[in-house]
Image (tube, grey):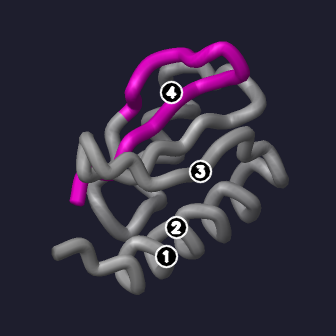
Amino acid sequence: MTDYDSIWHLQDEMRTIVNAVLGETIWNLSYNEQRRAIELELSLHLEEESASNLCSQFPTTVDYDGEGTHGSKFVAFL
């Protein structure tokens, strides 16, 4: 069973961190039920070092997931 309260809480934490570190640059932040993961895509493309620094700010393990059409993508598996 999916714990949506935990998912929403983690999404809020992720949004707060991105806004604090990069400003309002979130293109998409959503839960992917098939992957059982929260997916984050920014509206800008980050260099490798900046992407790594952002990943280290989150309260859970977040991995760089490549480049999307709008910007850098990240994923937090639950």
The disc placed on residue 11 is 2
Pick the residue in front: 59 or 1: 1
Q: CA distance from mark 3 to mark 2?
A: 7 Å
The amino acid type, in three-letter code, at marker 4 is: Glu
**Which of pointers 2 and 4 indicates the residue nearer the eye?**
2
Residue bounds of the magenta highlight: 64-78
The amino acid type, in three-letter code, at marker 1 is: Trp
Instruction: Find residue 3 and report its horizontal and vertical position in percent.
Output: 28, 80
- Disc 2 on helix, strand or loop? helix
**Which of pointers 4 and 3 indicates the residue nearer the eye?**
3
The answer to whether residue 31 is magenta is: no
Instruction: Find residue 51 and report its horizontal and vertical position in percent.
Output: 52, 33
Cβ atoms at labels 3 and 2 below 8 Å apart: yes
Q: Earlier in the sequence, mark 1 or mark 4?
A: 1
The disc placed on residue 8 is 1
Q: For residue 40, what is the image quadrant? A: top right
Residue at position x 50%, y 27% from top? Answer: 49
Q: CA distance from mark 1 to mark 4?
A: 28 Å
The amino acid type, in three-letter code, at marker 3 is: Leu
Task: Name the residue tied to disc 4.
Answer: 49
Q: Quadrant of the N terminus?
A: bottom left
Q: CA distance from mark 1 to mark 2?
A: 5 Å
Instruction: Find residue 39 and report its horizontal and vertical position in percent.
Output: 46, 44
Q: Is residue 48 above or below residue 21?
A: above
Q: For residue 25, what is the image quadrant? A: top right
Q: Is residue 6 left or right of residue 73?
A: left
